[in-house]
Image (cartoon, helix red, strand yellow):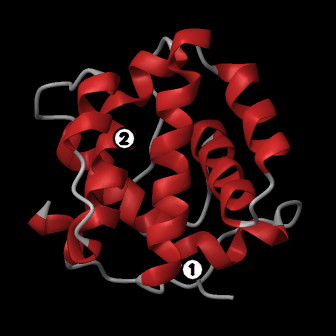
Amino acid sequence: MGSVAKIERFQTLETTEDASLQPFAPLLNRIRFAAAGCRASARVDIFRACALLSLDASAALDAHVEALVSTLSEAIGRRPVFLAPGTLEMSFDERWLLRLIERAYAQDRFSAAFLIGRRTRPEHGRALSFLVHGAARFAQQVDDVSG
């Protein structure tokens, strides 16, 4: 988790159709660093990840992001595509995840539930929602959303 804490921030995304995602560029970079770190480590069961998360505000965002990235393949049934940190473009998976976090950040639970339901296995919906809403909440607290 320590490697994710030291992140060079980038402020823009190359996106014209998703301007509302622009404030989430620093959070996407954090997600990409976590994804790069998780490639080499063992996968964590999504339900166990939810139980292990700390509520300590200083580490909670890193814990949520790392748990989210390391369990996302289990929830969507395939390995998600994450581009290198600092890349201006977004993959389909990154765009979906950022839109999901953005809807959670806006407290739009209906849209978040719809996005989760369209791409995930039903048994993983509640756990994924917990991780996404936690990432959105803690991103706001540590100013990982510029807006």
Quarter of the picture containing the C terminus is bottom right
Query: What amino acid is found at the position of numbered circle 1 in the picture?
Result: Val
At x 21% / y 56%, what residue is drawn? 54
Residue 69 bears which disc, if any? 2
Determine which quarter of the picture holds residue 43: top left
Are there few (<14), some (14-19), or many (20+) residues within 10 Å of tag 2? many
Name the secondary structure under disc 1: loop
Could you say which is closer to the camera, residue 92 or residue 6?
6
Which residue has dot 1 on it? 145
The alpha-carbon separation of the residues under discs 2 and 1 comes to 18 Å
| Picture layout, residue 135 above or below residue 39 | below
Residue 86: x %, y % from top left: 43, 69
Secondary element under disc 2, as helix, strand or loop, is helix
Residue in view at x 47 percent, y 56 percent: 134
Between 33 and 54, the one nearer to me in the picture: 54
Residue at (27% x, 62% y) in the render = 55
